[in-house]
Image: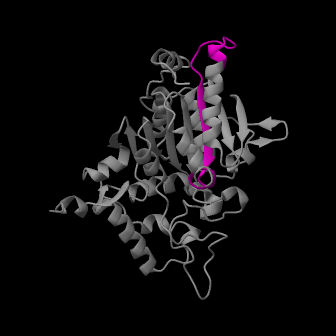
Amino acid sequence: MAISDREMAELTRLHTPQKLDPFKGVKKLPLEEYFTSGHRTCQGCESALVMKLMVKAAGPRTIVLGSTGCMYVANTTYYSTAWVVPWMHTQLGSSGSAALGAAAALRALIRKKKIKDEPINVIAFCGDGGGADMGLSAISATLTHPEYNCLILMYDNESYANTDIQLSGSTPYGAHTTFSPPGSKKRIMHHRWKKNMAAMMAAGHPSCRFVSTVCMSYPVLAMNAVRRSLSIGGPTFIHSLDPCPKGWDYDPMLSHELGELAVQTGIWPLWQVEDHKLSLIGKTRDIADGRLKRLPVRDYLLKQGRFADFTDEDIDYFQSKVDETWNKWVIPGMIPIHKEVEQDQPPA
């Protein structure tokens, strides 16, 4: 049976999003922590920092749903968890389904007056394996339901890190994983370019009001993206790049620096699409506007053991591909359509 305009208006009114103003700087962040000690992540784990700052940005009236992965296994052991807010485990490919189901359940409880009518944030997180690979269809489906408020955050350490660093759709070209080890006869085993997950979500889901890329090496930008995504209403999506000491093979003290280098070399552009309007943000905007020069990818690649087998020729190839995304794509690092296409004459 078709739903009336009046009923749709009532559904939209129920479970209105919480208004979360952007933070003005690090000194303005709240002191309260909702992801605390007791987790068992690796030293230097940036994904743990994502969890900490994500829920700090969201605040106490938040429900977190976590897909199987590093941030599920490390953050929950028998009768123990680092989460202070309500938390629930969901299956590997079902972050989208869990987010939508939780948002719908809250709306039903409010409508039936089973719980207080108040804004409650719903956040479902997933890794790149559980999001960009196995969970892609569920996330896509969720982003087509504008009447439900929820955030899906994909923390991307560029591998299936929980099960011993296997190749994922987000693994960069040439990286050494347990599924792509360099051999004596074939040195580069992985020839695919990284999946452009956030751009797919922004371009393919017109009813989704907010999509963003973040990196916790720029914490205030990232936390404000979380706050905006929860405030704007409807389902939203954030893609976070998370350096991983174990999977990327580097000294854990370099995690923050590698996040910065990923952005400053142009490998990981920071941007957001709000109500179909694109904005480059932070250092990425400075690079695009000419205020900051992109660093060479060599500075980023050679700090990681997963690229230890790269030759100068491999580094030059990697640099050329990144240059292409900045110099030839319609939008730097985001939309893989060459600018030359715009100049083609239409058929007679």
| Residue at (63% x, 45% y) in the render | 48
- Where in the figure is residue 2, as x and y percent of width and height? 52, 24
Tell me if residue 33 can be seen: no
Residue 191 percent location from the top left of the image: 51, 73
> Is the residue 163 above or below the residue 32 in the image?
below
Please say if 210 is above or below 291: above
Report the quarter where the C terminus lies.
bottom left
Tell me the residue at 52%/66% (across/down). Answer: 303
Answer whether residue 97 is magenta in the image. no
Range of residues picked out in magenta: 109-133
Magenta-drawn stretch contains 129:
yes
Q: Which x, y percent locates residue 40?
A: 74, 47
Where residue 225 appears, as percent x and y from the top left, is 46, 36
Asked whether, in this view, residue 272 is left or right of residue 258, the answer is left
Residue 128 in sight: yes
The residue under the point 63% across, 51% down is 130
When asked about the image quadrant of residue 124, the answer is: top right
